[in-house]
Amino acid sequence: MSQSLHQLRCFVTTMECGSFTKASRELGLSQPSLSEQIRLLERHLGTQLFRRLGRGVAPTEAARTFAPFALTALEAVSAGDRAVMSLNEAETGTVRFGLFGAAHLYVSGDLVCRTLDQHPGVNVALVGQNSSEVIEDIRAGNLEAGLVALPIHNEERLHIEPVARDELVYLSADPQRVMRPATPSVISAAKLVLPEVTWGDKDFTRQQLKRTVQAASLPLQPRVEVENVETAIEIAAQGYADTIAARGVVRRVAPKLGNKLYAVELAPRLYEEFAIVYRTNTHLSRATRTVIERAKDLLMEATAT
């Protein structure tokens, strides 16, 4: 007969406590019961695991050799328990999923509907105004997973799965300003309206633009700053300033505007890259995995050229 999980727990606890008396108290067993479990395990392994030493016990070389395997087995079972509990809880609980600021223009409404179609018992919370905020909430365990813009700094303990990218374009109501690709000198000299005023240089798109312009020894100085990209595009469409946005966003927002906008690529070309992120030690529920798969599908559809 193979060793049982109960025997492994008795063995590991005795190793940790260094005493049958302390180990039995820790496990809520009588000392004879614990001793019997250790004896059965020793019979199975064909070797002695502990030697009595005063009021305690000392592990044998066989015990020290066996200990990491026993720990691995117990941790694997514990992880399996947590995974199943997570699945069960999420079927009636709340899936908390993070999104970068403009993600609602790519995925959010359809993401909720498709998730509820498959998991009608769950609640869904889509959280986040900026990728930096979402990433920190994932690290802290406040969110199960998220769809964010790259890059991600301090990647330790995070699973990162790149999904899609979307090209940034220069937008103007004046067709004369988009006759050729927008260079760093054009961007620096332009009257620009840029979104993400609260996040500023912490915003990943703003970081890209700033690096590109500064590489040409030029400043990036927007004339107007607003919170969301829809407002920036609306101001640009009315001719008060030009702006820079991702093509997928422009395709969603521009048709709703009364004025026409003209677009041209940047030189050098820049892209927003998006990824699914969650902690590497997280057991994702079935509903959360559904959210992830639907988010990936919708984002790839929205950014397809």
Image (cartoon, rainbow, N blue to C red):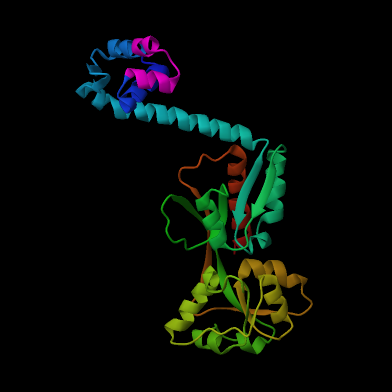
143 vs 217, nearest the viewer: 143
Q: Quadrant of the C terminus?
A: bottom right
Residue 252 appears at what percent x and percent y? Answer: 70, 66
> x%, y% of residue 62?
22, 22
Residue 33 painted magenta: yes
Q: Which residues are magenta?
A: 20-36
> Based on the displayed image, in which of its 4 quarters is residue 300 positioned?
bottom right
The quadrant the N terminus occupies is top left
Residue 1 appearing in the image? no
Q: Is residue 3 left or right of residue 191?
A: left
Image quadrant where residue 272 sits: bottom right
Q: Left or right of 75: which side holds 64? A: left
Residue 254 part of the magenta-drawn span:
no
Outermost residue, front side: 55
Considering the whole magenta stretch, tell me its main secondary structure.
Answer: helix
For residue 22, above or below residue 282: above
Q: How many marks?
A: 0
State the residue at coordinates (52%, 70%). 202
**Picture layout, residue 161 above or below residue 3:** below
Using residue 103 as the reference point, say whether residue 72 is left or right of it: left
Residue 69, percent across and down?
Answer: 32, 27
The foreground one among 125 and 117 is 125
State the residue at coordinates (34%, 21%).
11
| 288, above or below 182, in the image | above
Where does the image place residue 299, in percent across and percent down from the top left? Answer: 61, 57
The reply to whether residue 41 is visible in this rendering is yes
Q: Residue at x 68, y 36 (%)?
A: 92
Nearest to the observer: residue 66 or residue 87:
66
